[in-house]
Image (tube, helix red, strand yellow):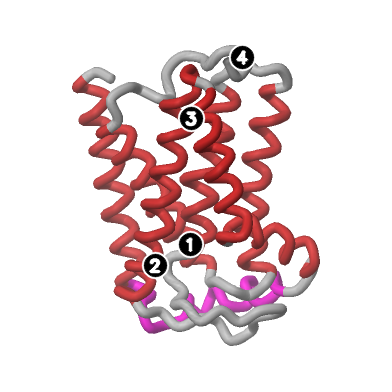
Amino acid sequence: MSLALRLASLSIAFSLGGFFFIVGHAVDHAPDPAWLMPPEASWVNHSTLIAWWLTWFGWIDVLLPVAIVLTAIAIRFPAWRSRATFAIIQLLIAWQSTDLFQRFFARPRRLDWVVKHESSFSYPSSHTAVAATLYLVLAVFAARSTLPGRAWISAALALLALGIMWSRLDLGAHYLTDIAGGLLLGGAIVAALAACWPTNVFEGRAPTTLE
């Protein structure tokens, strides 16, 4: 990656990180603004079963097998090694950093949860950060490959990421600003890691097959 691209990625990372802290300090220890609460309340508990299944894709029960598969791909297929390793590392960073920032901002959860009440704090949404750093990035990798059906694979991964974000609202597990915070943090992580990565993982096309 050229120096100009690295500097651009760092600039994006700092900008997104700055907005992340601005939103966090605006909402910590408080619910969303009054004008946002009625629409947010109206989004809860409409397709609960679907939302519940989608939200599992942001928990360790699914993320661990995904990480194992990515590790196997990194070991077995050299052409995909850099992208798979990139995805694993940013997933770990997102997972740990959201836990850290949730404790830092200490924003209480919503009171209108359905299905499961989680004990962690609310801002940012760890599910959204994972969706942004893992599933959306994998969607980009798929789109920039020459794999058969790459458009369908990429679209499915992108829809999964969006579905995970939606599920947190449908279950009443997060405020809309938590979702925004997760996106900002996830984007900052992707940009920062891309700036430090030895190669440009978003440049060029991966091989047609895993070989």
- What residue type is disc 3 on? Ala
Image height of 94 relative to 138, above or below: below
Residue annotated with mark 3: 74
Q: CA distance from mark 3 to mark 1?
A: 25 Å
Query: Which mark lies nearer to you, 3 or 2?
Result: 3
Mark 2 residue crowding within 10 angstroms, few (<14) / some (14–19) / many (20+): some
* Local secondary structure at mark 3: helix
- The answer to which of marks 2 and 1 sits earlier in the sequence is 2
**Residue 91 painted magenta:** no
Which one is closest to the eye, mark 3 or mark 4? 3
The crowd level at tag 1 (other Cα within 10 Å; few <14, some 14-19, many 20+) is: many
- Name which residue lies at 67% across and 23% down: 150
Up-down: is 178 above or below 73? Answer: below
Residue that numbered label 1 is attached to: 126
- Helix, strand or loop under label 1: helix
Classed neighbour count for the residue bearing mark 4: other residues with Cα under 10 Å, few (<14), some (14–19), many (≥20): some
